[in-house]
Image: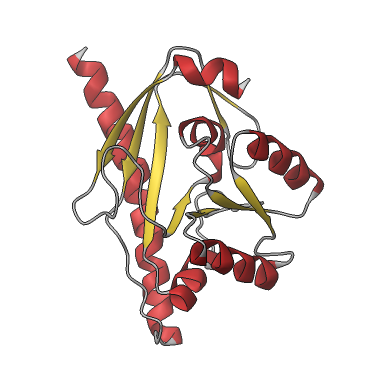
Amino acid sequence: MIRLIGPTLRFQAVVEKGSVTDETLYGPPGVYCFWHRCVIPAAYRFRNMGISIMISRSFDGECIARIVQKLGFRPVRGSSSRGGVGALIAMRRELEMGQLAVFTADGPRGPMYVAKPGPLLLARITGHKIVCFHIAVKRAWILNSWDKMIVPKPFSRAVIYVSSALEVPQDATDLEMVSLHQQMQAAMETCAAGAEAKLKESSIQT
């Protein structure tokens, strides 16, 4: 399905000032995160880039891991609820090898649009910055799942909104981590709102 629908999608990128990437979206090693509902368009747009993505050890996670591996991703198994510490160590190794480390911030089971601390923890222990992004799709089927997963309809427009980089000091205190978590949550929400706004703006212009 991804390989059939993906080539018909028309992507547009919006990148905030201060981001570590540009409109090509080929960024340097770092910690990237997005909402779980965008998995399908993201899987196509970022295919064959050797990106490392954390995927849960659940049965559903096993299916997803096999699919994304065929699309050129490097699945790292673990989540906030199962195998989290080991997965963070594995993601750290991926960054050390020059890979991009990607999280579904509200995965694997939600609540929807509530960011977990995993990306922050990885950024603190590695010194890499966090970049958030969101993909909004003009026409899509919305699944009746906890994340309201997006399945793009063929030939739809899609907007990727990428945030500026969030730096997490390696000596950040617990109190500072709470504040940084709030900043990451806000950045995720800004990306979602920005992508939807750009999509509406493009629709008006056309």
Q: Along the line of sight, which residue is nearer the eye, 153 or 96? A: 96
Who's the residue at 66% across and 34% down the image?
70
Q: Along the line of sight, which residue is nearer the eye, 189 or 123? A: 123
Who's the residue at 29% across and 49% down the image?
21
Who's the residue at 36% across and 65% down the image?
129
Q: Residue 163: x percent and y percent?
A: 30, 51
Q: Is residue 43 above or below residue 118?
A: above
Q: Is residue 46 left or right of residue 10?
A: right
- For the rendered model, the colour scheme is secondary structure
Q: Residue furthest front?
A: 97
Q: Along the line of sight, which residue is nearer the eye, 82 or 124? A: 124
Q: Along the line of sight, which residue is nearer the eye, 91 or 138? A: 91
Q: Is residue 97 left or right of residue 162?
A: right
Tally of numbered tags: 0
The image quadrant of residue 193 is top left
Q: Residue 17: x percent and y percent?
A: 18, 52
Who's the residue at 54% across and 35% down the image?
43
Q: Is residue 151 above or below residue 85?
A: above
Q: Is residue 146 above or below residue 71?
A: below
Q: Residue 84: x percent and y percent?
A: 67, 68
Q: Residue 18: x percent and y percent?
A: 21, 57
Q: Is residue 103 above or below residue 24?
A: below
Tell me the quadrant of the picture where the N terminus can be found.
top right
Tell me the quadrant of the picture where the C terminus can be found.
top left
